[in-house]
């Protein structure tokens, strides 16, 4: 097989990887009602599927932190795409192969969640290692493709089900498997660089002693929490505030949120050579605080919905921006640093929705009060970015 030599192909393969990751993370949620009616699986057990997916990806964050540099990027990233494709292929097959269909669903999720977890850790350092200009812009553009993948998956799947019925979901799952499967061959022939030479990256122990690493670690937690706190509740806001049905609520809530989040990342990618990343990140964090306040205190429901949606634009740069800043500040961090930053972001994503739900219950099931308490997350982001700016100022002095 002929090898490609230009790193533009590497970037394209990475973009497809993030679209694949969006498909495997979100496709199954469109099928929960069908699983409930066809297989008789309880809503509690269906909700646990997302937890299993997340737990497996967290495990991969920790595993790749220890073996990523030793094994090498190419075999791991090619294997991850094979696992994602296998999970989507097995999703319609395994539930029929077991007396309890739930076991089959769990096994399929274990396959594609393992691949997705590896993708989440490795794709960012692969992009960072590409010998290109405007690395922070490339990182932002990379993460926008997760948003576009999510939006396209929802729109295409919705249209497919409208044409052929929800009963055709097994065919659609096989069709979605073609996305990571094709990328197996693409990643087999593109050039892949290294962040550091073998043996030169920081050990995990050295990384943990670095105070800057811990600043970025907590920034990533706050970034994930700021994003997922509003994203997970935006559909509920749309349904309860505008009194629309769930399909419309999903389009006006999570879908619009994802579109604006992706747009923010594309805009920074275009401006990355002309604007400071820290300044853009600080402005986005301040905008996030404002949008949270608008969502909570807007006197008109449509304004509250716009507050939810524009939060997507505000949080867009938080995750990729923090990764780019950490790569510049700790150039010897290696794959382990990217793995632990992914772990921190995932922890923030996992904790925020529950945090909002618990506090909403404390205030008498007032969702707006729970979201108001979540303003803590963008406030932490603002403080962290200000610390980074102050450190830069001291360095110049």
Image: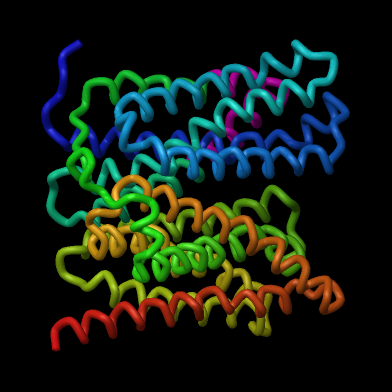
* Magenta-highlighted residues: 152-174
Occupied quadrant, residue 91: top right
Task: Using the rendered view, name the quadrant where residue 303 is placed.
Answer: bottom right
Indicate left or right for 47 with 344 as reference.
Answer: right
Q: Position of residue 390 (x, y in %)?
A: 28, 85
Q: Position of residue 379 (x, y in %)?
A: 50, 80
Q: How is the image coloured?
A: rainbow
Assess whether residue 171 is covered by the magenta stretch.
yes
Q: Is residue 335 above or below residue 225?
A: above
Specify whether residue 9 is painted magenta. no
Q: Taking 390 as reference, is 11 above or below it? A: above
Report the side of 163 relative to 257 (left or right). Answer: right
Residue 130 placement (x, y as % from top left): 18, 43
Residue pictured at 45% horizontal, 36% vertical? 118
Where is 195 relative to 378, above or below? above
Q: Camera-side residue: 205 or 108? A: 205
Q: Residue at x 41, y 55 (%)?
A: 262
User: What type of secondary structure mainly makes up the magenta span?
Assistant: helix
Q: Residue 282 lies in what quarter of the image? A: bottom left
For the N terminus, the quadrant is: top left
Q: Is residue 35 left or right of residue 22?
A: right
Q: Residue drawn 21% across and 65% down?
A: 271
Q: Residue at image x 79%, y 21%?
A: 101
Asked if residue 116 lies left or right of residue 135, the reply is right
- Residue 19 can be seen, yes or no: no
Query: Residue 281's spot in the image, x, y percent?
Result: 35, 72
Quarter of the image for the C terminus: give it: bottom left
Whether residue 41 is visible: yes
Q: Nearer the viewer, residue 74 or 97?
A: 74
Given the current orientation, which residue lies at the most extreme bottom position? 397
């Amino acid at each position: 097989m002929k090898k490609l030599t230009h790193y533009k192909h590497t970037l394209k393969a990475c973009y497809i990887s993030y679209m694949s990751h969006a498909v495997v993370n979100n496709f199954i949620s469109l099928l929960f009602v069908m699983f409930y009616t066809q297989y008789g699986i309880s809503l509690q057990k269906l909700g646990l599927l997302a937890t299993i997916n997340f737990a497996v990806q967290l495990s991969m964050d920790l595993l790749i932190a220890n073996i990523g540099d030793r094994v090498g990027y190419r075999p791991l990233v090619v294997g991850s795409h094979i696992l994602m494709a296998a999970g989507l292929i097995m999703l319609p097959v395994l539930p029929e192969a077991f007396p309890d269909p739930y076991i089959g669903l769990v096994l399929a999720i274990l396959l594609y969640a393992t691949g997705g977890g590896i993708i989440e850790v490795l794709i960012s350092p692969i992009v960072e290692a590409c010998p290109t200009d405007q690395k922070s812009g490339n990182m932002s553009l990379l993460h926008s493709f997760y948003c576009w993948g999510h939006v396209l998956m929802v729109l295409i799947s919705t249209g497919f089900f409208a044409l052929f019925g929800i009963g055709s979901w097994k065919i659609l799952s096989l069709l979605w498997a073609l996305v990571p499967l094709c990328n197996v061959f693409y990643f087999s022939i593109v050039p892949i660089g290294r962040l550091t030479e073998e043996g030169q990256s920081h050990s995990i122990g050295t990384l943990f002693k670095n105070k800057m690493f811990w600043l970025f670690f907590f920034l990533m937690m706050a970034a994930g929490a700021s994003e997922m706190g509003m994203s997970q509740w935006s559909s509920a806001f749309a349904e309860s505030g505008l009194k629309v049905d769930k399909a419309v609520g999903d389009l006006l809530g999570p879908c619009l949120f994802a579109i604006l989040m992706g747009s923010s990342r594309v805009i920074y990618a275009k401006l990355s050579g002309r604007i400071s990343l820290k300044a853009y990140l600080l402005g986005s964090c301040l905008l996030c605080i404002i949008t949270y306040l608008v969502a909570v205190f807007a006197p008109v429901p449509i304004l509250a919905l716009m507050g939810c949606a524009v939060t997507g634009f505000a949080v867009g740069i938080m995750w990729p921006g923090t990764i780019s800043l950490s790569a510049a500040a700790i150039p010897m961090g290696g794959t382990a640093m990217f793995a632990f930053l992914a772990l921190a972001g995932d922890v923030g994503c996992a904790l925020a929705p529950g945090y909002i739900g618990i506090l909403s219950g404390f205030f008498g099931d007032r969702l707006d009060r729970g979201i108001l308490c979540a303003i803590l997350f963008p406030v932490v982001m603002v403080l962290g970015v200000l610390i980074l700016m102050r450190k830069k100022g001291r360095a110049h002095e």
